[in-house]
Amino acid sequence: MDIAIIGGAGHVGLPMSLVLGDAGHDVTLVDTDEEKLEAILDAEMPFSEPGAKELLAEQLATDGFDATTDIDGLDCDAYVVVVGTPIDEHNNPQMDNLLDIIRKLRSQIGDGELVVLRSTVYPGTTDIVRSELEKAGHEVGEDVYLSFAPERIAQHNALEEIIGLPQLIGVFEDESYVRTRALFESFLEAECPRLTPTEAELGKLFTNMWRYLTFAAANEFYLITESFATNHDVNVHRILDKTARNYPRFDVPSPGANVGGPCLTKDGWFLVDNIPYNELVTAAFQINEGMPAQIVNSMLEKHAEPDKVTILGMTFKPNSDDTRNSVAFKLEKQLQYKGINDIVRIEPNKEGFDDWDEVKGSDWVILMTPHDEFADLQEVHRQVDNDECTYCDIWGFWEKMRYDSENGFMNALEFDFDEAQTKVL
């Protein structure tokens, strides 16, 4: 099958393209970012994704893997649309780019061809796409086929999850489901539950909202625990871990200094206009986005104001090179607002940040993103070389910090490096 992936150079589109190519399909990447497409055709991944570079090299060795910036003139059996759908400055979803693509495609789509929407969209968008196709004289289910089949992957685990996770398919009629399912079953090792398009659109949003809300709950538990820390010996990880032990109804993630990223942070805003009581979504946003201010304020209350601060991790999730919507940058601004300007930013997965030799003498070290490169606390402290340094790890990433710290804060003099310091998460 000839398949066009529109948005094919992105974090979702490119792994999907590689999996489809590996399944024997001829794939054309379509993207407006010419620089990324050139890098891809030179066998260079534009972002980090385990296993993708090797799979890309394999696909480029075939005759069935190509790329273009021009959507006009495409003649494919299926078009998978997986472009970004951000929110604007007023937190309103922006569907214009996706709909512009559909308007370009509708006049060149031929009989029997399939359009698969994979972008996260405002509920009801697939209905609008059907109307756009009808304006060009098409009838969905008769001469063209349409489905909403949302991506459900986590970055840095994309190739495994595209194949292994169930694929929701939202359709208006039977034949579009049959054709979409056949496309996914050419590589999928899981099932393809059928929904209506709006049900699938809501299901995608609910998935991300639920994960974001659980992060907010964990962070709220952390803040509640912190409010008792002045007069009581309390540690949020001791509470969560031991309360959950052998108890099936308390499955809470670790609190996190840096959660959300480009998807989870925005997806709740797709729905707030339709929710009678939207405080749950807005409160989750305020809690998660407010963690940098909470961290800085807590440290200033408990410890002397620093001359130099090191931030460990600037990407939005561990072991990723994606800095979009990372609240590590909010932490940097919070420090600057307090007059702290000697700030070292360590990010081993992306160029443009500081080197390890610049952390020496830091008064504070704040772990924002728990990369594997930071797992050895003793090595981190060796680089800092300051026994008066205060460490902040609300993730519980370092075992010593998880249970023995003052709710995520500890002075280096309290470290006992004869004990294990391996990461926990």
Image: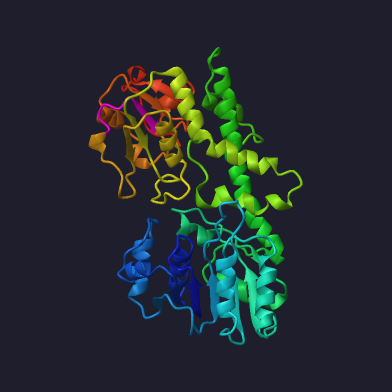
In the rendered image of this protein, does residue 144 appear above or below residue 290? below
Residue 35 in the magenta stretch? The answer is no
Left or right: where 127 falls relative to 73: right
The residue under the point 58% across, 34% down is 218
The reply to whether residue 274 is in sight is yes
In the rendered image of this protein, does residue 377 appear above or below residue 262? above
Q: Which residue lies furthest to the top in this view?
A: 231
The reply to whether residue 183 is in sight is no
| Location of residue 52 in the rendering, given as x and y in whole percent from the top left corner | 38, 61
Magenta residues? 359-366
The residue under the point 42% across, 51% down is 322
In the rendered image of this protein, does residue 103 appear above or below residue 317? below
The residue under the point 50% across, 77% down is 3
- Picture quadrant of residue 131: bottom right
| Location of residue 41 in the rendering, given as x and y in whole percent from the top left corner | 33, 72
| Location of residue 124 in the rendering, given as x and y in whole percent from the top left corner | 70, 64
| Location of residue 80 in the rendering, given as x and y in whole percent from the top left corner | 54, 72
What secondary structure prevails in the magenta region?
loop
The residue under the point 37% across, 32% down is 422
- Picture quadrant of residue 339: top left
